Amino acid sequence: MSAQAAKFLAQWEFEHIALVARSDRAEQARRLALQCREDAVRAGISTEDLETAVEGNLFDNMLQALNAAEFRQMYRDQIADQEGGA
């Protein structure tokens, strides 16, 4: 895998992944995967390198990132509740 592709993907996800309702997640993952591919090509990263960086499935990677965003928010909310009740 290209280190450049992995770095690009990490930065891209940081900039583009946000909380999305579960009912909209699959469609959002499709849109994000398409946008990520287009942005990668514009950045000089081949589709092959990008697919290698995500082990061959950009859609699943985006879906996983969207799910992780929800879990991070749930964790932050839980910590805030604990701190508020202490």
Image: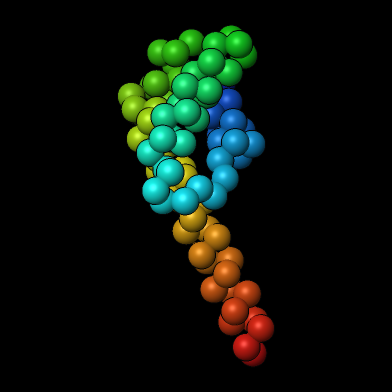
Q: For the C terminus, which image quadrant?
A: bottom right
Residue 71 position in % (x across, y down): 47, 58
Residue at 63%, 74% in the rendered image: 80
- Residue 76, by quadrant, is bottom right
Residue 48 position in % (x across, y down): 41, 13
3 to 25, vertically: above or below = above
- Residue 50, by quadrant, is top left
19 to 43, vertically: above or below = below
Answer yes or no: is residue 5 visible: no
Q: Is 33 displayed left or right of 73 in the figure?
A: left
Q: For the N terminus, which image quadrant?
A: top left
Residue 30 position in % (x across, y down): 42, 29
In-front residue for pair 52/26 = 26
In-front residue for pair 11/15 = 15
The single residue placed furthest to the front in the displayed view is: 23
86 to 34, vertically: above or below = below
Q: Is 31 displayed left or right of 85 in the figure?
A: left
In-front residue for pair 2/40 = 40
Q: Is 47 displayed left or right of 82 in the figure?
A: left
Residue 17 position in % (x across, y down): 56, 40
Residue at 53%, 23% in the rendered image: 35
In-front residue for pair 75/10 = 75
- Residue 43, by quadrant, is top right
Answer yes or no: is residue 47 visible: yes
82 to 20, vertically: above or below = below
